[in-house]
Image: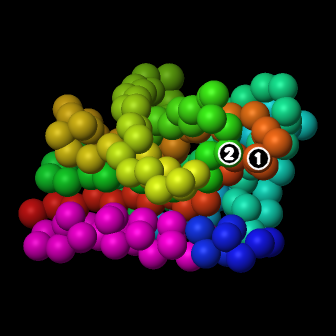
Amino acid sequence: MTARTSAAIVFASALGSLAFLGSFSSARASESLAVSPMGCQAKAADRGKVDVSFNKGIFNNSTTAAARVFCPIEITAARGGSDTQRSAVVWVIDNNSSVDFSCSVVFTVNAGGSTGNISTFQLTKSLVSGNMIRYGVEQPGLSPLVGYDSLHINCTIPPKTTAGVSSIMNLYWSSFSP
C-alpha cells in the first residue's frame, strides 16, 4: 500500500464519519451503523470479478466489465416508516475515469413472504476529492417514508484500469426518530 492510498483511506474514513454524523447532531439516534465492505457479496454472475482486501475493501479486478455487489445492512428492528431522518452513504475509490459507480439503497418488507414490497432509492455523488467519492442519499431523498424489515445497498463497481482497481471502502446507514 502506498502512502497516498493509506492517507486516502484515513481521510475518507474521517471525512465520511464527520460528514455522516454532522447533519444529525440535534436529533436522537435510533440507529447509526458503519458497515464493513468485507460483508458485501458479488452477484452470482460477477463472483469471478470481485475480490476483498482489508486495505482496499471490496473491489472489481476485471479489466473488461463492471461488477455488481450486494451489501446487507443488519438492522436491529423493523421500522414502521416513522423515522424522521434516514441516510445511506458509500465511500468509494474510483480509478476509472470513464465509468462511474452506481449505488442504491433497497428497503424490503416481508422479504421472505409472498407479499414482499421493495423500495429502491439511488445514491448520488455528493463529494469528490481526487479519486475518493462520497455517494449518498438523505431525507427528503428517501421519501416516501416506507416501512421496512430489511435493507441492503447495491453497487456496480467500475472495471479496473491502469490507474488501479475501483473499490468500496465504507458504508454507513442511519435512521433517526423523534
Give the residue at mark 1.
Answer: 163
Q: Position of residue 59 (x, y in %)?
A: 74, 49
Residue at 61 percent of width and 60 percent of height: 169
Front residue (pair 63, 141): 63
Q: Secondary structure at mark 2?
A: loop
- Tell me: residue 36, above or below residue 94: below
State the image quarter where residue 101 is shown: top right
Q: Position of residue 167 (x, y in %)?
A: 68, 50
Looking at numbered disc 1 in the image, what kind of residue is underneath it? Ala
Which mark is drawn over residue 95?
2
The N terminus sits in image quarter: bottom right
| In this picture, residue 41 sits left or right of residue 89 | right
Residue at 40 percent of width and 58 percent of height: 173
Closer to the chain start, of discs 1 and 2, is: 2
The C terminus sits in image quarter: bottom left
Task: Specify few, some or many for label 1: CA neighbours under 10 Å numbering under 14, 14-19, or 20 or more.
Answer: few
Marks 1 and 2 close (CB-CB < 8 Å): yes
| In this picture, residue 72 sits left or right of residue 138 | right
Front residue (pair 12, 38): 12
Front residue (pair 167, 155): 167
Which mark is drawn over residue 147?
none
Task: Specify few, some or many for label 2: CA neighbours under 10 Å numbering under 14, 14-19, or 20 or more.
Answer: many
Instruction: Find the magenta span and give its range.
Output: 9-32
Residue at 36 percent of width and 46 percent of height: 126
Residue 28 inside the magenta-drawn segment: yes
Residue at 27 percent of width and 47 percent of height: 138
Q: Position of residue 133 (x, y in %)?
A: 49, 51
Q: Is residue 138 visible?
A: yes
CA distance for labels 1 and 2: 6 Å
